[in-house]
């Protein structure tokens, strides 16, 4: 469940990321009535087993069984909730086409939300790893070792979000960031899901990495994500 919109008096249009059919929009009838039989099953974050019936314009949800009630684990933790909201919004934007199968994005999102709810890792790290990986799946994998311009292997000192990764001193574009070598290593570890390497990083490197991940994300989505403003970094 990615997001919902009001429809008419009592209904909602629900935007979903599905395992088999990618991004789908469907109508939940009567969901805004206080006596709704849907309860909280059709709220953002919930992972449900759905049945849909073909409607005139949009499909109609006929049944929903909860698989994972992520909101129950996120609701009491502001930092987890806001980071999770960024994940939903990112998935919504990266899987733009409706009904195009996007199994990898689906699995990344469910895995990321599950990691967010356990609280085993800091929410910002789960989020940054998810953002880099979902961008990579969408075809925007950043390079942290080879210069994106000439391909020469680094380590390189400059990172440019719009160019797609690190740049050598000869190719660097104006406005490139010059993060520490450790920060670029952390970003590579976040992309690879190498958690021991992420855990070994210091706070300054993690903060710098978060800033660059945000810049990279903003570049690839035409406009910024509203929800990202609320994540503490
Ligand atoms: Zn170069």
Image (tube, helix red, strand yellow):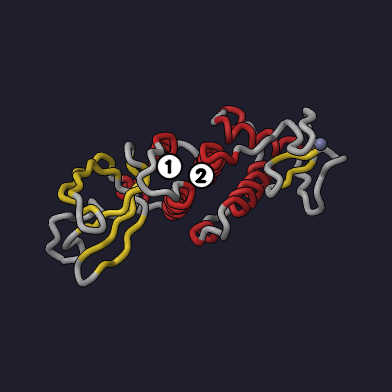
Q: Residue at x 72, y 35 (%)?
A: 182
Residue 114 position by quadrant: top left
Q: State the residue position of label 1.
A: 116
Confirm or deny contact between disc 1 and disc 2 (CB under 8 A): yes
Where residue 178 appears, as percent x and y from the top left, is 78, 45
Give the class, few, some or many, for how many residues have Cα within 10 Å of label 1's Cα (few <14, many ≥20).
many
Where residue 70 appears, as percent x and y from the top left, is 32, 45
- Residue lying farthest to the front in this orientation: 56
Asked whether the viewer can see residue 132, the reply is: yes
Quadrant of the image where one finds ligand 1: top right
Where residue 32 appears, as percent x and y from the top left, is 21, 65
Residue 41 sits above or below residue 115 on the image: below
Give the class, few, some or many, for how many residues have Cα within 10 Å of label 2's Cα (few <14, many ≥20).
many
Q: CA distance from mark 1 to mark 2?
A: 8 Å
Q: Earlier in the sequence, mark 1 or mark 2?
A: 1
Q: State the residue position of label 2.
A: 127
Q: Is mark 1 within 8 Å of ligand 1?
A: no
Q: Residue at x 32, y 49 (%)?
A: 24
Q: Secondary structure at mark 2?
A: helix
Q: Residue at x 20, y 72 (%)?
A: 9
Where residue 31 appears, as percent x and y from the top left, is 19, 61
Q: Nearer the viewer, residue 30 or 188?
A: 30
């Amino acid at each position: 469940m990615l997001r919902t919109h009001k429809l008419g008096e009592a209904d909602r249009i629900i935007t979903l990321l599905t395992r088999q059919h990618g991004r789908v929009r469907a109508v939940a009838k009567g969901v805004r009535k206080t006596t709704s039989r849907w309860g909280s099953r059709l709220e953002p974050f919930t992972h449900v087993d759905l049945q849909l019936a073909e409607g005139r314009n949009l499909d109609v949800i006929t049944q929903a069984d909860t698989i994972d009630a992520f909101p129950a684990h996120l609701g009491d933790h502001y930092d987890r909730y806001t980071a999770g909201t960024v994940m939903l919004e990112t998935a919504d934007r990266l899987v733009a086409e409706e009904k195009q199968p996007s199994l990898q994005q689906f699995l990344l999102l469910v895995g990321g939300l599950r990691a967010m709810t356990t609280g085993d890792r800091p929410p910002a790290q789960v989020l940054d790893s998810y953002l880099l990986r979902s961008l990579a799946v969408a075809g925007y994998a950043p390079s942290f070792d080879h210069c994106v311009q000439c391909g020469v292997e680094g380590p390189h000192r400059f990172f440019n979000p719009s160019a797609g990764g690190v740049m050598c001193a000869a190719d660097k574009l104006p406005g490139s960031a010059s993060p520490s070598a450790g920060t670029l290593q952390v970003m590579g570890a976040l992309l690879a899901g190498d958690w021991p390497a992420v855990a070994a990083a210091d706070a300054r490197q993690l903060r710098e990495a978060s800033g660059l991940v945000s810049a990279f994300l903003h570049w690839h989505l035409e406009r910024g994500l509203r929800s990202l403003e609320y994540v503490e970094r």
